Image: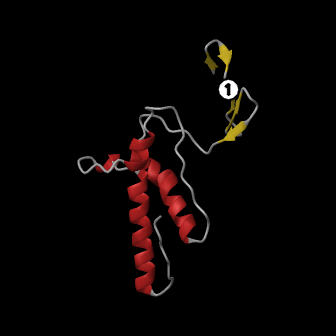
């Protein structure tokens, strides 16, 4: 990709890595376009992260990009008018609490949740 006439980054589609002009590589899992809705992205990314966290793994979701590209919308939109627009954070929190509650009722697991 060129910015101001200079090569700013290169991509390697197989390794999913970009390399900035300073040589620093950044690896990513995926890129979603403007035709994807938050519901689809939740099932591709959010739900597996919640399952991994409940199985004892650390799980982190990061949205990175240029200003105005939809990071806040993708993570936090709590739209009551269009359920598909609801962001990943509320969907993931709901799934986490529902799964933890179900496990507690079944007596199979105990979870301690804290928000900071």
Return the x and y of residue 29 as percentages of the image width and height: 61, 45
Q: Residue furthest front?
A: 116
Snapshot quadrant of residue 8: top right
Q: Residue furthest top?
A: 5
Question: Looking at this view, is 11 or 72 the one in front?
Answer: 72
Residue 79 in view, yes or no = yes
Residue 39 in view, yes or no = no
Residue at position x 64%, y 12% from top? Answer: 5
Label 1 crowd bin: few (<14), some (14–19), many (20+), radius 10 Å: some
Q: Report the number of numbered marks.
A: 1
Snapshot quadrant of residue 30: top right
Q: Residue furthest bottom?
A: 107
Circle 1 sits in a helix, a strand or a loop, which is it?
Answer: strand
Return the x and y of residue 50 as percentages of the image width and height: 51, 63
Question: Would residue 104 appear left or right of 23 to someone viewing this image?
Answer: left
Question: Looking at this view, is 21 or 116 the one in front?
Answer: 116
Residue at position x 32%, y 51% from top? Answer: 78
Residue at position x 57%, y 56% from top? Answer: 60
Quadrant of the drawing holding the N terminus: top right
**Residue that numbered label 1 is attached to:** 9
Residue at position x 67%, y 26% from top? Answer: 9
Q: Using the image, determine if residue 48 lies above or below residue 56.
A: above
Q: Using the image, determine if residue 31 lies above or below residue 21.
A: below
Snapshot colouring: secondary structure
Q: Using the image, determine if residue 78 lies above or below residue 18.
A: below
Return the x and y of residue 84 as percentages of the image width and height: 33, 48
Question: Would residue 106 appear left or right of 16 to someone viewing this image?
Answer: left
Q: Residue furthest left?
A: 81
Return the x and y of residue 58 as percentages of the image width and height: 61, 63
């Amino acid at each position: 990709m060129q910015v101001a006439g200079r090569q700013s980054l290169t991509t390697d589609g197989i390794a999913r890595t970009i390399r900035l002009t300073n040589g620093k590589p950044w690896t990513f899992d995926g890129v979603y376009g403007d035709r994807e809705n938050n519901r689809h992205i939740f099932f591709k990314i959010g739900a597996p992260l919640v399952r991994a966290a409940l199985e004892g793994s650390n799980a982190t979701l990061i949205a990175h990009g240029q200003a105005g590209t939809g990071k806040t919308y993708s993570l936090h939109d709590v739209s009551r008018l269009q359920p598909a627009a609801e962001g990943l954070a509320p969907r993931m929190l709901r799934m986490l609490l529902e799964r933890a509650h179900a496990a507690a009722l079944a007596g199979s697991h105990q979870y301690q949740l804290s928000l900071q």
